[in-house]
Amino acid sequence: FALAPPREQRFRPTTKLRPLQWTRLPDSSLQGTVWAASSAPAVPAVPDRAGRGQPAPPKPPSKPDLEQALADLGVFGELEAQFARAAAAVAAKADEGDGREVRLIKSARAQNIMIALKKYFKDFETVADLCDALTTVGRDSGTEFAYNEVLKCYPIPDEAKLVSAYAGDVEILRKAERFLFEIIKVPLSKERMESLQFKEGFAERFSALDQDIKLATGAFKSLKQSSSLVDMLKLILNIGNFMNTGTFSGSLNGFRISSINALADVRSAEGKTLLQFVAETVQEKFPDMLQFLDDICDVQPASRLVFETVRADIKTLQTELDTTKQVVERVRAHAETAAASAAVVACGRFLEFLAPFCASAADAADDLEQRSRALATLAQDVARRFGEDPSKTRPEELLATFAEFCAAFK
């Protein structure tokens, strides 16, 4: 179904009126409701007062037109007379307490904004100064902002319309409304704050991913390079073939790597496991093989990584960086066309702060991506080295197998 066209309003007040705090019904929800009626409601009849010697008021138009009738009957005029917003009167009473301040949004919403921003208001002389810091230099202003909380305070479309339509004295607005009023004056303010939020969290996110890749790369390299680990596996192969002599499972040339943890399931008559027997044999007769425990010590912590999550986090980081770079270009374009010198200066400070970051962050993100691809290739090589199919063996499964064996062997 087609959305309803914007409602035409032919009559407008000549002065600001007190706002009606109602909630918009989405156009997509109008079909089948009273608001979708094809014709306007009938205009109520006006009592004929001619018999009292008074001139009769204008008769309603022949075709029902409620808006025209309200104008003709003077209803709009009465609204202006009785509900005009007396800004000067409010200003005079504003000092009597918050209850006399101008309120544009719901009290619960205003309270939530004040709770989130209270700790920041004290750091800045004016609300405008706070909004400037939030959208230009972030924590370099001397205040460490929790942007995830600040962005929850950003005005929704209906609030933005209410605040932008306000033409009274800004100083008599509640601080919550003053924040909304000032923040929407800043071009691309929400996008700037999201970019600053990304910048301030980038180093920590990069460091975590960098450590994950280094840890996993080191673990797989150790599995690929440890000669003592190969010796240990050959020892297990010989012991296993000896135990399985004359059976279908004997005389093997190799075994699936997951089989190393099956040693703990075989027990002697006295209850000793085959793993314990192998460990004692190595300690007493082949102590050099114990070097494998030190060689692949990174396998244990690396086995806790989920490689799909690491790759997804790198992709998300790159996507958010691309978005931030787009915001920088949009702010740059705005600065080139802005007429107000203050806006140009604010855009310039944002660009000086974010543009160099985007360049260095792009290099860092590209490096992460390259090392992530190299890690995937290394993991496949290691899987093949131990006779596993890389397409059927997840990297963390291979690491977990060796981690379990090392923990039990010790």
Image (spheres, helix red, strand yellow):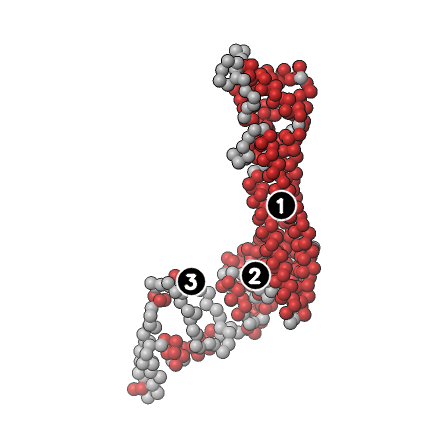
Could you give the CA–CA distance between mark 3 and mark 2, rounded to whole angstroms? 26 Å
Q: Earlier in the sequence, mark 1 or mark 3?
A: 3
Q: Nearer the viewer, mark 1 or mark 2?
A: 1
Badge 2 element = helix
Could you give the CA–CA distance between mark 1 and mark 3, rounded to whole angstroms? 44 Å
- Name the mark on residue 176: 2
**Amino acid type of disc 1?**
Glu
Where residue 233 appears, x then y in whole percent? 60, 22
| Quarter placement of the N terminus | bottom left
Quarter-wise, where is residue 152 in the image?
A: bottom right
Badge 3 element = loop
Residue annotated with mark 1? 369
Q: Where 199 sits versus 290, above or below?
A: below
**Amino acid type of disc 3?**
Pro
Q: Which residue is located at x 62 percent, y 36 percent?
A: 378
Where residue 363 appears, x then y in whole percent? 67, 50
Residue 128 in view in this figure: no
- Name the mark on residue 26: 3
Q: Earlier in the sequence, mark 3 or mark 2?
A: 3
